[in-house]
Structures are given as structure tokens and as C-alpha cells.
Image (tube, rainbow, N blue to C red):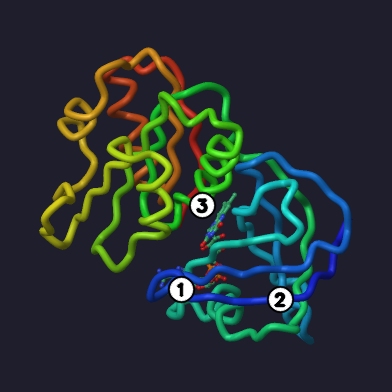
Amino acid sequence: MQYKVKILMMEQETHDVKRFILEKSEVFSFVPGHAMMLAINKPGMEKQSQPFTMTSLNDARVLEFTIKRYPEHKGVTDKLHQLNPGDELILSDMFGTIRYRRPGIFIAAGAGVTPFIAILRQLAKDNKLEGNTLLFSNKEHKDIILEREFKNMLKERCILTLTREEREGYEYGRIDENFIKKHVMDFNQEFYICGPDSFVASMREILQKLKAPSSEIIFEK
Ligand SMILES: Cc1cc2nc3c(=O)[nH]c(=O)nc-3n(C[C@H](O)[C@H](O)[C@H](O)COP(=O)(O)OP(=O)(O)OC[C@H]3O[C@@H](n4cnc5c(N)ncnc54)[C@H](O)[C@@H]3O)c2cc1C
């Protein structure tokens, strides 16, 4: 099933991430964390679809995507960032990648945080954020997506680390075994991981070593 939807609004979230607000003319439902294939409805672009996660809630009257641009790829994200309100996108093939089960530790790097946006927003709406923690790694402060919202939702359970900038109030360095041991007291809970391939692989290795029972793993880039 394909949905053609117009862009209603675009907003710069960080220097290389934009929020895309789209009309939601068709009725479809999704679980927070789900993604869809998205293409630009312009000649020659209709078949170049890439996966992106819905960051709005299922019952919202509009759809939101939060998309990082990779100008050097000269691909879909580069073109998406150059669109304007009124331009049309083609959405297809909804699929589940990550799904909330019970309270736990969300570990994200960069734009890998997008499935956690919808999941945490839904938990906030349902008053069920209790017991959840976000460990979020970025290169520099300017790269952090939705910092204020995450801090508002999770308070001291929003732990931000910067790998290329030392800054007061932020951890410095990669998420490694020591970092996880410092911030996680209980390994008998859910772990949700999302980020580049190498990040996911190293988190998985660390968690297996620390005997975390299960972890949800998704995407690269
Ligand atoms: C399930 C899922 C959900 C996702 N959700 C989101 C989301 O919500 N938000 C988000 O921002 N991202 C998300 N992503 C990642 C997103 O899909 C990719 O960032 C996106 O596909 C990149 O598309 P692109 O066309 O710009 O570049 P690509 O398709 O990666 O690359 C286009 C071309 O550029 C070349 N290229 C590749 N890498 C490089 C490089 N390092 N340098 C130079 N050239 C290169 C290749 O030849 C390639 O053919 C998600 C991914 C998955 C799997």
C-alpha cells in the first residue's frame, strides 16, 4: 500500500536534522518505533525509497519524521532536506523494527534515537515513563536531537555523552563497558539499542558480557 502525502511544514531541529510534518490524509495505524519506506514524489525519485521512523504518535492528526541529512551521499536525505512545504512524498511498506515491552535502558547514538522519540512520547502521554533511562551518545552538543524534550521527559534519567566535546553537565567519551556499569545498576531489565552498525555491535557485545537478558537491536547510520 502506498500513501502520497504533502509536506505541511519543515523545521530545522539541529544543524543537520530536520523535522518533517506531513499531512495524514489516509487512516493507518502504527506502533511507536515503527518505520516506513519514504520516497520523493518527483520524476526519477519515486523509486528511491529509504526507511525512516515515524516520530509522531499514532493518534496525532499529522505525521512527523525526524531526518538527518547526509549531503555527501547525494541520496534521498540530501534531496529531502531541499524540499519545501507542498512537495509530496510517497510512503509505503510499514514495518516494525523496535517495540517497547517493559521499562528499561534505551541506548542510542546520533539519529539512531528516532524510534525512541515516538516510544518515549507515547510513554509520557500514558504516564508510564517511570523506570526508563536514556543513554544518548553524540559527537558534539550541536548534534543532540530533541535535547530539551528528552530532559523534560526523563529528568536525571536522560544521560547525554559527547565524544568530541568536553562540556559541563555532559559525560565525555563513548558509551563503553565502564560507562554502562556506571549508569546501569540492574541488568535484569530490557535494553533497547539503536544506532550505527558498529555501535549496535559493540553495545550487544558489552551487554552480553554483563549478562543483560535481552536487547532490542536496530538500525544503522
Ligand atoms: C528501520 C530504519 C529506520 C530509520 N529511521 C531513520 C529516521 O527516522 N531518521 C533518520 O535520519 N534516519 C533513519 N534511518 C537511516 C536512514 O534510512 C538512512 O540515513 C538513509 O537511508 C540514508 O539515505 P541516503 O539516500 O541519504 O543515503 P544512502 O542510501 O545511505 O547512500 C546513498 C549513496 O551514497 C553512497 N554513500 C553511502 N555512504 C557514504 C559515505 N559515508 N560517504 C559517501 N557516500 C556514501 C552510496 O554509494 C549510496 O548508494 C533509518 C534506518 C532504518 C534501517
Q: Vertical placement of 157 versus 64: above or below?
A: above
> Which residue occupies 24% across, 63% down?
140
Q: Position of residue 151 (x, y in %)?
A: 35, 47
Q: Quadrant of the N terminus?
A: bottom right
Of labels 2 and 3, the one closer to you: 2
Q: Are marks 2 and 3 in contact (CB under 8 Å)?
A: no
- State the residue position of label 2: 8
Q: Secondary structure at mark 1?
A: loop
Of labels 1 and 2, the one closer to you: 2
Q: Position of residue 166 (x, y in %)?
A: 11, 59
Tell me: is circle 1 under 8 Å from ligand 1: yes
Q: Is residue 28 left or right of residue 154?
A: right
Of labels 1 and 3, the one closer to you: 3
Q: Is residue 169 left or right of residue 88?
A: left
Q: Earlier in the sequence, mark 2 or mark 3?
A: 2
Determine which of the numbered discs, if any, sits on residue 70 in the image.
1
Tell me: is circle 3 under 8 Å from ligand 1: yes
Measured Cα–Cα span from mark 1 to mark 3: 16 Å
> Which residue occupies 65% across, 76% down?
9
- State the residue position of label 3: 114
- Callout 3 environment at 10 Å: few (<14), some (14 to 19), or many (20+)? many
Q: Earlier in the sequence, mark 1 or mark 3?
A: 1
Determine which of the numbered discs, if any, sits on residue 145 in the image.
none
Measured Cα–Cα span from mark 1 to mark 2: 22 Å
Q: Vertical placement of 181 versus 87: above or below?
A: above
Q: Vertical placement of 31 versus 169: above or below?
A: above
77 vs 148, nearest the viewer? 148
The residue under label 3 is which amino acid type? Thr
